[in-house]
Amino acid sequence: MNILFLSLFPVSDLSQHGIYTDLLREFVKRGHFVRIVSPTAEQETADLPRDGYAILWVKTPQIAGVGLLKKGIGTMVITPNIKRALKRFCADEHYDLVLYPTPPITLAGVVDWVKRRDGARTYLLLKDIFPQNAVDIGILKKSGLKGLIYRYFRAKEKQLYAISDRIGCMSQANVDYLLRQDPEIDPAKVELCPNSVEPLERTITAERRRELRERYGIPQDKTVFLYGGNLGRPQGVPFIMGCLRACRNRQDCFFLICGSGTEFPALQAFAETERLPNVKVLPGLPHDDYEDMVPACDVGLLFLDCRFTIPNFPSRLLSYMQARLPVLCCTDPNTDVGDVCRGGGFGWKCLSNDVSSFCAAVDSACAADRETMGAKSYEYLLANYTADQGCRIIMKGLE
């Protein structure tokens, strides 16, 4: 098949590792050709096909590292840009399958155009439920001026669902929510298609572990809890601050927060003002250092704002699982990510508005057999979240 992949995820080379590049490599391995649409702030251009894929660079507005509302508005202009670039650079290409994740939800126009032109099948990888997620955390409202914005994006969301032949959801809670929220969707076209990766060995030597901890001022003899990733409104940073403050006098654990995002400056200023002795907040590490830092820690952390009514399922979980870490999930009551981790024997869960429950979960993690739980984490990844499995699910759904 010829596959068109539409995303705002920047791809410079298919050798990169991530939930999208790993999945696309599986299609290439099976003999399919993949045309990848990738955003750029530079001049638009198209690569020549190589090794089963090619990249189309499309000029897009700045949407990385900005708030949800600004990101949503920025995505409004993307569809005509992609359509124009496809006509200009890829006029001779026709596609059998259009594969596209959310965000954004504003790709319906270009998806529908390719579907009608080429008779292509369409598969939505539902990674984000916008605009309801923005309503949940107070960025949008369903009334007033912001209500107009909400209704615009809600219409785009429904349009995207309608033109999708298949919709792959990250978890069962996602499937249930989608069908409950949009009962007009045919349940037969909605299926479970989790985040997936090509499994890699993310273990390190004891010497490398000691070296990294020493370099970044992390104690050698304490249980280290790691959060790595985006720090924005969806992560509920005020709750994170409350948890760190509540654990400030603990002698048995250390918290490493490594990331970026709209709320990172506030969290960094908080850590500096509070002078927490067992907390380090870093703006980011060199790629190789971060990849090794994950297995140099003991427990992975997930944070989601407790106000969410939509069931998020953070892809960050997979990096912890590859490093054989158990995971402490601090979330809203609607996601099932905590149930998956606890049910699989490799994690703990608490609500992200209950600091005392977080402290109790930290107690459990410090006392646990983390090596055994980490092994279960990796085994669960191999059984459920590989890119090979993701590719098979998509192909089977299109039969």
Image: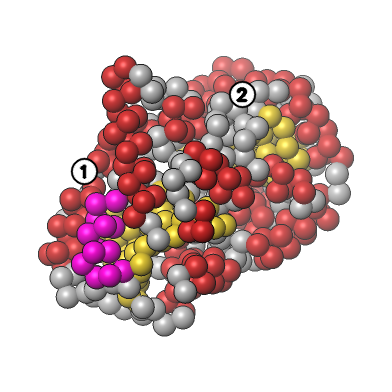
Residue 212 pos. (x, y %): 64, 49
The residue sitting at 42% across, 76% down in the picture is: 28
Whether residue 118 appears in magenta in the rendering, the answer is yes
Whether residue 374 appears in magenta in the rendering, the answer is no
Q: Is residue 131 above or below residue 340?
A: above
Name the kind of residue labelled 2 in the image: Phe
Q: Nearer the viewer, residue 188 or 368?
A: 188
Q: Is residue 367 above or below residue 39?
A: above
Residue 397 seen in the current view: yes
Q: From which residue to which does the magenta span run? A: 108-120
Q: Is residue 273 above or below residue 337?
A: above
Give the mark, 2 or 1, whose residue is nearer the N terminus: 1
Name the kind of residue labelled 1 in the image: Val
| Residue behind mark 2 | 239
Is 339 left, or right, of 12 in this rendering? right
For the residues labelled 2 and 1, the Cα–Cα distance comes to: 35 Å
The residue sitting at 23% across, 64% down in the picture is: 116
Q: Nearer the viewer, residue 130 or 328?
A: 130
Magenta part, dominant SS: helix
Q: Is residue 4 above or below residue 174?
A: below
Q: Secondary structure at mark 2?
A: helix
| Residue behind mark 1 | 77
The residue sitting at 81% across, 29% down in the picture is: 360
Seen as rendered, the residue at the extreme left is 88
- Callout 2 touching callout 1 (CB < 8 Å): no
Residue 80 pos. (x, y %): 18, 50
Q: Secondary structure at mark 1?
A: helix
Q: Quadrant of residue 204?
A: bottom right
Is 155 left, or right, of 306 in this rendering? left
Residue 209 pos. (x, y %): 70, 53
Crowding at label 2, few (<14), some or many (≥20) Cα neighbours within 10 Å? some
